[in-house]
Every structure is written in C-alpha cells, then in structure tokens.
Image (spheres, helix red, strand yellow):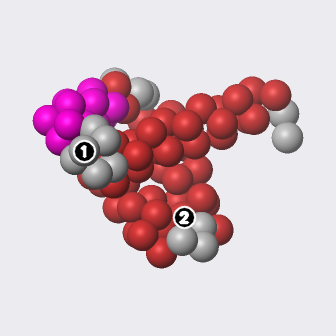
C-alpha cells in the first residue's frame, strides 16, 4: 500500500473510532452534550471535503464495515456516512 493511502486509511479509521467512542460512551464517561457537539463538528468538517474525498471516505468506511465482526460497531459503520452528512452535501 502506498504511503499516502496508508495515511488516509489510518486517519479515516481514527476519526471513525473517535466518533464511535463519542456515540457509544456512557454518560458518566463523556457528557452527552459535549459528545453531540463533537460529532456535529466532525460532520461539519466532513461536509467541507470535496466530493471525491467524501466518496473515498465513504468507500473506506463501507469496506471496514464489511470486515467488522462486532455487530454494533458494524451497524454504526453502515449508518455513519449518512449520519455524518457525507451523503447529504450539495456538490
């Protein structure tokens, strides 16, 4: 795998893992309002990506969902592109 591809895959994975943590963390671990604010910020930043980059990110997330063995996380991955606004941005 090319160095840039490795970087993109790892960064995409980190952002998705962070979003999963914020989404699934118990209220005693992360304040729900703070979690929501951070998830909205992630969505906002994703909405600023050019269409090609958004489509690449969606492909990486879908690829990861296909190989995920944990059912709750797999379902999160399947719904994440739409929930994060990756599919709703006007080009």
Question: Residue at image x 75%, y 27%?
Answer: 4
What x and y, as percent, mark residue 68?
59, 67
Q: Secondary structure at mark 1?
A: loop
Front of the two marks 2 and 1: 1
How crowded pointer 1 is (Cα within 10 Å; few <14, some 14-19, many 20+) is rated as few
| Distance Cα–Cα, label 2 vs label 1 | 28 Å
How crowded pointer 2 is (Cα within 10 Å; few <14, some 14-19, many 20+) is rated as many
Quadrant assignment, res 43: top left
Give the overall secondary structure of the magenta segment: helix
Position above or below: 50 against 85: above
Q: Is residue 47 visible?
A: no
Q: Quadrant of the C terminus?
A: top left
According to the picture, the residue beneath numbered tag 1 turns out to be: 28
What x and y, as percent, mark residue 50?
42, 28
Q: Nearer the viewer, residue 26 or 80?
A: 26
Q: Secondary structure at mark 2?
A: helix
Going by the picture, which residue comes out furthest to the right? 1
Question: Residue at image x 20%, y 37%?
Answer: 31
What x and y, as percent, mark residue 16?
47, 44
In the rendered view, does 40 fall on the left or right side of 50? left
Q: Which residues are magenta?
A: 31-43
Residue 65 badge: 2
């Amino acid at each position: 795998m090319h160095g840039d591809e490795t970087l993109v895959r790892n960064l995409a994975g980190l952002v998705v893992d962070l979003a999963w943590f914020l989404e699934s963390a118990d209220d005693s671990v992360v304040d729900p309002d703070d979690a929501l604010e951070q998830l909205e910020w992630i969505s906002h930043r994703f909405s600023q990506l050019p269409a090609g980059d958004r489509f690449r990110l969606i492909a990486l997330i879908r690829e990861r969902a296909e190989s995920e063995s944990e059912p709750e996380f797999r379902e999160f991955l399947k719904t994440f592109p739409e929930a994060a606004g990756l599919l709703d941005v006007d080009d």
